[in-house]
Image (cartoon, grey):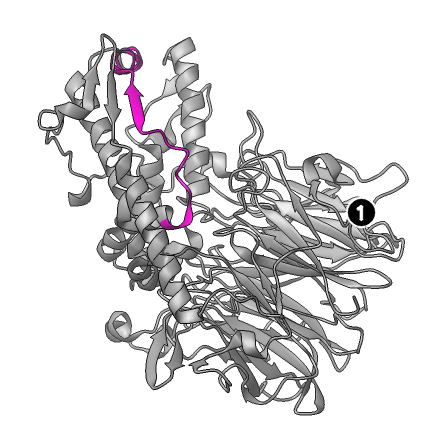
Amino acid sequence: MVADVSWHSLGIQQGFLRTMAAVDFHGSYSEAHSAGDFGGDVLSQFEFNFNYLARHWYVPVQDLLGIYKKLYGREVITKSAIVDCTYLQFLEMYGEMLAVSKLYPTYSRRSPFLVEQFQEYFLGGLDDMAYWSTNIFRLTSFMLENGTSDCSLPENPLFIACGGQQTSAQGSSKVQKSDFHRNLTVSLTKETGKNINYTERGVFFRVDSWTSDSLTFAYQALERNIRTMFTGGSQQSLKHVSSPLASYFLSSPYARLGWAMTSADLNQDGHGDLVVGAPGYSRPGHVQVGRVYLLYGNHLGLPPIDLDLDKEAHVILEGFEPSGRFGSALAVLDFNKDGVPDLAVGAPSVGSEQLTYKGAVYVYFGPTRRGMSSRPNVTITCQDTYCNLGWTLLAADVNGDGAPDLVMGSPFAPGGGKQKGMVAAFHSGPNGSGKEKLDVEAADWMARGEEDFSWLGYSLHGLSVDNRTLLLVGSPTWKNSNSLGRLSRTQDEKQSLGRVYGYFPPNCRSWFTISGDKAMGKLGTSLSSGHVMVNGTRKQVLLVGAPTHDEKSKMAFLTMTLHQGGTGRMYELTLDTQPPLLGTFSGDRRFSRFGGILHLSDLDGDGLDEILVAAPLRITDITSGLLGGEDGRVYIYNGKQTTFGDMTGRCKSWAAPCPEEKAQYVLISPEASSRFGSSVITVRSKNKNQVVVAAGRSSLGARLSGALHVYSLGLD
């Protein structure tokens, strides 16, 4: 029940479906509810493997009746209600396992928010629901052992508290039931008794084993036949790189290793080191506290062998707040200006236990001979509820003194409304070492979003243009509502166009903006910059990702729309003018999120940056999920071979776009449905520049724990 409360925003603000309504359905909760409730089941079946679930369930009915009576002091539920409701869940689960995942294209198209935020959204996403379910189990155990006299038991389970603790309520603690939450009392067990066996204290449910197995076999056979028909067999391209040099993993499930990554020479030996966050890391009694792992490189680069980072990482930092999601963002800079690089770590869900989700940023001063401190030297906090401080971090020179400063993005922060977003920066300096606590309101530089649910600060990027720092901030769910009258907003506004703001600090007003042109395109989801050769001329460029932008596809004489295929736009950066558009890169599959991650780095040592574009949700078969699942790809384009216009539209083959045809390398996911390409970074040593690709939902070490794959390209 507690998971249902945050999902449906019952008695709270900005829960999952409420925010989904604001972002994707013009504020209509009823539309979001109809799409989200069943769509969540569709998404779960498509993206997650449920083979671990048993075909036989045992429900301890008498024990449950006793627990309810002890909790409430009276009988509040009947035996038949427990049996009927659990059997309904049992049937629904196996009914969904048979074929419901094939509806993925329908629900993915209706709501990009559902697909992208289903697991990670801070209030009502899967991870948050898991935390609250665990929390309620803990409180229930306390009440069973100690009674309920020291507990507050409101109708809304989110606000249950024991031992004098109180949960902050943003709305009524009473669950307001609507037509969507009627109590269904239809008895199913009488008509399906052949699959139910009663015992003295409980009941067994079972399902025939042939059902799901036979349908799975049929789908797999059909997939093989269609793939062979379209490809003529699975001939491997010479561009494909399917085997990484090494893979790093964790043995803890649901850790989300690789959610954030950065690279810097932390131990100052002249070689790049890898810093990676795992914000979902948990251990018994410490749910989603999060971890950060440091892996030092040497003259050979990163370790060329598979590693369990819980055992082999050189440094491990662990969060200390319940469900704080420590490691969600990372930045390396000399914050106290002592000549040694420091590490900043974001924990945006700090305060989740009080339902405030204010967040925090922790700064660890650089390693000394005794190593890095296990406790932060500086803590930066936010006082706003739902601030989510530390969701994104960046090291960039804001005050023009030549030293990077700490920039923090909070896309879900109120910003004077609801989820307008906020970006704030603190200057680096010797005084920073003397202050253990800082409040974000005292920041040296700050900008806020223009409108509700615009998510300013979702992405951050900094670079130097003519010796001035240009700070780029993405607002992917920005829409055009300010240009419309109040009466016409809901009907005519284009949602999630996306916008990028370019600032020249210390000025808090943007110097320029780049706006999206298509509803649901989410321009500004990702940002990167570098130097490439465009038609023979060296240019400094900005790449902006719009991963849910619809693209036109041509197959021979047929034209179709690739919904949410994704695109990356390349702009020329100059000091005095609005950045002109130079060219575009587009994905070749529906829902692939091409451009969701962008990174520019010189891989071959020629002074020009290669362009790395990830499509983490790319689906192998052209039916976009009817047959196969996600495999994810990362495309690498040579910096010497970029041209004006549509880079991936001029194709030799019969199909366009052709992102693979134009790429120098294509990194292929070694594991299906692992979100390969959820993050990309390069780590430079003296002799090479290695590519590290995160697969945030890999089960290489443990279920959905995440993995990192290391590739040596270019000079090798």
| Image height of 306 relative to 569, above or below | above
Looking at the image, residue 603 lies above or below residue 11: below
User: Residue at the spot x=31%, y=35% of the render?
Assistant: 173
Q: Does residue 294 appear to the left or right of 415 in the view shown?
A: right
Asked whether 55 falls inside the magenta stretch, the response is yes
Instruction: Please say if 116 is above or below 612.
Output: above
Total marks drawn?
1
Quarter of the image that includes the C terminus: bottom right
The location of residue 255, given as percent across then percent down, is 56, 40
Quarter of the rendering containing residue 278? top right
Q: Quadrant of the N terminus?
A: top left
Q: Residues within 10 Å of mark 1 (few under 14, many from 20)?
A: some
Q: Which residue is mark 1?
A: 433
| Residue nearest the viewer, comparing 71 with 711 | 711
Give the residues in magenta. 46-71
- Residue toward you, 172 or 343: 343
Q: Secondary structure at mark 1?
A: helix
Residue 478 appears anywhere in the view: no
Q: Residue furthest bottom?
A: 536
Q: Is residue 179 left or right of residue 316?
A: left
Q: Is residue 689 magenta?
A: no
Outermost residue to the top: 200
Q: Amino acid at mark 1?
A: Ser
Picture quadrant where residue 66 is located: top left
Q: Residue at x 41, y 61 (%)?
A: 453
Residue 371 at x, y percent in the picture: 84, 39
Rendered location of residue 134, percent (x, y): 44, 28
